[in-house]
Amino acid sequence: MAVVGDLRVLLRLRDFRRLLTVRVLSQSADGVFQVALAAHVVFSPEKQASAGAIASAMAVLLLPYSVVGPFAGVLLDRWPRRQVFLYGNLLRAALACCTALLILGAVPDWLFYVSALCVTAVNRFVLAGLSAALPRVVDRDRLVLANSLSPTAGTLAATAGGGLAFAVRLLLADSDAAVVLLGAALYLASALASLTLATGLLGPDRHGTRAGLSEALAITARGLADGLRHLAARKQAARVLAAMTAMRFCYGALTVTVLMLCRYAWTESESEGLALLGLAVGVSGAGFFAAAVLTPWAAGRLGRLRWMTVCAAVAAVLEPALGLWFVPLPMLVAAFVLGLVTQGAKIATDTVVQTSVADSFRGRVFSLYDVLFNVAFVGAAAVAALLLPPDGRSVAVVGGVAVIYAAVAMLLFRWGRTEQAPTGEGRCFT
């Protein structure tokens, strides 16, 4: 198959392999850290977490990026991206160690959240930088395949890291601090892996001389507006970002639903609930892997927007068919399906943005992309908190999510009618 041949070529590219290593180590650490936080907030025996408490925690950890994120993008377009990976991961390793100490100590919840926020805040720079740097190590003809392999490998690494964190916590009582320290070690490994990449290899392109601090702050504000105008002028990129944001909202609402079901409806103890949640995460990760295999072929045959249309339509049909039972087995099947369609749509979205946006604007646009993800996820958690009963069984949430998926599918179908499907199987297209 052409896809297999292209994949072999990608993995023979030295700089692509090195960038992929940085991503895998960094996102595996993210998975470890996020599971440690979720377990500490939701599944600690002394805590009786509600949907509102979960939504509040998500808001504390994610909403500040709505302010910081776009400015981070402007900085990404000014800083060497290799150095962002190096110093960003070193900083996260140090901050994760501080978070572990706070877990061990009797500190107020707000101080714990501040420390966790600092760790995850740096993540915005690293992930946006990884996406913006990818076209610097892969030729345009194989970019869609690289977007299948690289982000999906990162997602699978995060899933594996989360699985490792689940295993450590289930084997060792009161081990949240140890799990966070494991994440710190992986952040350090990612920082060291970034040293294998040349400093100037990943961009961004330099134009003119560097401004002073005060001027840079003003340029940052103007740069945000320039990034928005740049995105608005590229209709296809703006459309797929809107569609992906709506799908992310759906994913967030269902995430809170599954958390509540695992915590209160399906199990009788916190350890059993955590184990079942870990299984759901693993099944969803298998869906991400399936998307990485399927998307290059499907997008190559159908076109990007048509493939996204299929993903949204499948979710609109299967999500209520499987979710309205509110029992574990159908919900696990739904987790696989949603992992596949969400990641498949994201791969197509990433490729549209990367090929539509100029290199000097990519950091800004991907940071805006990241902000849309965070706002959608937190907004979904807030809506779910209002609608979900204590045990997580809500026909309104499942039905409402299906309606949103259906609306996204119809809009994408309308937008995709003018897109010509490429003739090459599994190939990138313009």
Image: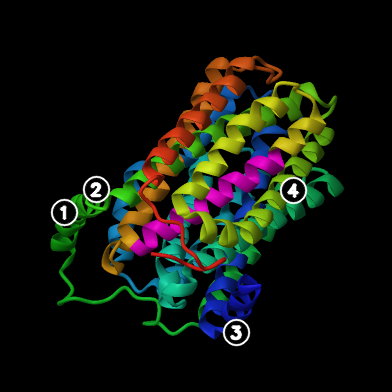
State the residue position of label 3. 12
Query: CA gap, disc 3 to disc 4?
Result: 29 Å
Please say whether residue 1 is one of the residues in the magenta stretch.
no
Confirm or deny contact between disc 1 and disc 3 (CB under 8 A). no
Q: Residues within 10 Å of mark 1 (few under 14, many from 20)?
A: few
Q: Nearer the viewer, mark 3 or mark 4?
A: 3
Residue at the spot 65% in from the left edge and 61% down from the top edge: 293
Query: CA gap, disc 1 to disc 4?
Result: 42 Å
State the residue position of label 2. 232
Q: Residue furthest front?
A: 423
Q: Which residues are magenta?
A: 335-355
Please say whether residue 353 is one of the residues in the magenta stretch.
yes
Instruction: Examine the rendered structure and indicate whether residue 19 appears above or below residue 180.
Output: below
Q: Main secondary structure of the magenta part?
A: helix
- Residue 311, image x, y percentages: 56, 43
Disc on the earlier residue, 4 or 2: 2
Residue 47 visible in the displayed image: no
State the residue position of label 4. 282
Q: Residues within 10 Å of mark 3 (few under 14, many from 20)?
A: few
Disc on the earlier residue, 1 or 2: 1
Instruction: Examine the rendered structure and indicate whether residue 56 appears above or below residue 87.
Output: above
Q: As shown in the figure, which amino acid type bears the numbered disc 1?
A: Arg
* Mark identifier at residue 222: 1
Classify mark 2: helix, strand or loop: helix
